[in-house]
Amino acid sequence: MATLLEFRDVSKRYGNDTLALSHVSFSVNEGELVSIIGPSGAGKSTLLRCINRLIEATSGEVIFDKTNVQQLSKGKLRALRTKIGMIFQSYNLVDRLSVFENVLHGRLGYKPAFVGALGLYHESEKKQALEILKSLGLEDQVYKRCDQLSGGQKQRVGIARALVQEPRMLLADEPIASLDPSSSKTIMDHLRHISTSLGITVLVNLHQLDIALNYADRIIGVSQGKVVFDGLPSELTDETIRTIYGADSEELNLNIPESKEVARKI
Amino acid sequence: MKMIRTAGPALTGRDPFTAKRIRIKLLTRSALVIRMTILMLALLTLLGFLTFNYQGVNFFKGVAATLSNFKVIFIQPAFAHVTFQGAIGELLITLSLGILTTLLGAVIALFLSLFAAKNLSNRMTSNIVKELVAIIRAVPTVLWVLIFAVSAGLGSVAAVIGMSFHSISYLTKAYSESFEEMDRGTIEALEGCGASWWQIVWQAVIPSSLTSMISWTFIRFEVNFGVAVAMGAAAGAGGIGYDMFMDSSYYYNLHEMGAIAYFILIVAMILEYGSVKIKDKIRA
Ligand SMILES: Nc1ncnc2c1ncn2[C@@H]1O[C@H](COP(=O)(O)OP(=O)(O)OP(=O)(O)O)[C@@H](O)[C@H]1O
Ligand SMILES: [Mg+2]
């Protein structure tokens, strides 16, 4: 399988003393679903945002589809970003607009500034957006305003907005952290489907270790800005979990053996 | 910061778990300053009333005379120099002055506020624009009209320019603060889609802030209507204010003043009612 994304010795420093990422290197293959796990403040969100340059890395190289992301001009960066969809813990939709309008925002990157600003879209784009909404089970919500939706529905709108970009990669920053277990499962099932059936590479930050073990093809463990584990879910030992989560691991240990069993069975 | 925070409990010296009367707020230094200020103002007001120079005017006689004038104005209104239709025409002129200056202000403020909002602009541009409009706002509208009257001559042109000028700075502040309330994550999400700055402004920022922008614009319109009445008198801008000025200063016709005052009151009430209705419509 071809490599789609590669981090080469990437570091990110905020101000003078916070080293959020420290010499991070790893690569992700096309079509993989990779989960990044680690305690709060480990640098997971920072890592994800270095890929589409919502945050600028301090040093090192991020290679996406054979191009060095850091060296792209403003226009090229826009083009790159259309190829990378992103979903968020807090959904980040424009609440006052309809589901349909929010999903179509995913097309803005393909348009000249003024056309997109006026909210003019091709019929073909609208059709595509409707089909994606249908595949996510949102066909009855198309004209609803986003502030009338449940959390799970909002996150599906977020996914639809990302998919309408026709991305090669989907970044998900703790997509289920604000959701109940059943909505979480729906969202994770969609992500799994996006990776397996649509062949879109998915990189997902997760707080829930059991879910990461259940859904991911591969797990990257981050602790204090460093990659401390990179391997298959089945290779994750209690020992490595302790190095990733440090002092927090005591509480986690309770349900790990059980969920690891589940992961192996799958 | 640290000093103030530790000063809170020290000032009151109370632990809510052991206190007899439990406070829900700590008496911080800023709360103390506010209380002292209010107390001082109350004392000064009292002192002012006690030391006024009434110059032989009997206070009670004065009040009685004022009340009798009010009676003429509000209980016996009548038209004399202007007709009812004429008053409506003059009123329309005043309203137009209010609408024109509000619209001019709103359009220019919309663009300025994009550069004033910290989350849409860079820090330096934002600071410069904000400082600039703060200075403009510090000078009252009437004064701006008089300043522009130096070059444009006293009249409607000076009134339009001066009133628009102040509206711009007022609305720039109001709009940019609405924009700054915009969720940072939503802007980030659209940046992540590859959307450009103008697209983010028109597709996310303005739709999210529209309700409060319209509210502010309407509030400003109400202000501008009031100023337009005053400008009719003070700057010779015409309109209903001028008629009122003539009644009060030349004809001494309090009956007609009353009629005009009612006219203005009715319009102000209609405006208020309309603004509430519009806001409800947008929210729904
Ligand atoms: N804009 C910023 N300015 C300064 N420091 C920051 C900024 N964003 C993040 N940090 C710091 O960088 C470190 C990594 O933050 P990051 O948000 O990437 O962690 P995370 O793993 O996503 O945490 P969480 O699981 O809580 O979301 C933290 O110590 C955080 O305080
Ligand atoms: Mg995070």
Image: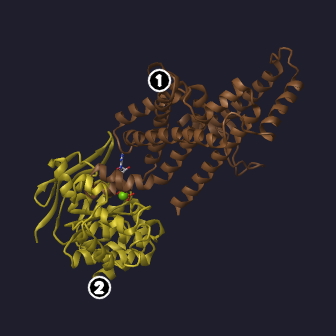
Chain colours: A yellow, B brown
Q: Residue at x 40, y 39 (%)?
A: B108
Vertical placement of B74 versus A259: above or below? above
> Which quadrant of the rendered structure holds the N terminus of chain A?
bottom left
Tell me the number on the disc at residue B52.
none
Quarter-of-image position of residue A212: bottom left
Residue A184 visible from this viewpoint? yes
B166 horizontally vs A120: left or right? right
Q: Of B263 and B161, which appears nearest the observer?
A: B263
Q: x, y percentage for residue B269?
A: 65, 48
Q: Secondary structure at mark 2?
A: helix
Residue at mark 1: chain: B
B131 horizontally vs A85: left or right? right
Q: x, y percentage for residue A121?
A: 27, 64
Q: Of A41 and A166, which appears nearest the observer?
A: A166
Quarter-of-image position of residue A33: bottom left
Vertical placement of B65 versus B193: above or below? above
Query: How busy is the neighbourhood of tag 1: few (under 14 within 10 Å), some, or many (20 plus)?
Result: many
Label 1 sits on residue: B148
Q: Are marks 1 and 2 in contact (CB under 8 Å)?
A: no
Of circles 1 and 2, the one toward us is 1
Vertical placement of A114 versus A83: above or below? above
The CA span between labels 1 and 2 is: 82 Å
Tell me the number on the disc at residue A265.
2
Q: x, y percentage for residue B85?
A: 63, 43
Say which amino acid is labelled 2.
Lys
Q: Residue at x 28, y 82 (%)?
A: A264
> Which quadrant of the rendered structure holds the C terminus of chain A?
bottom left
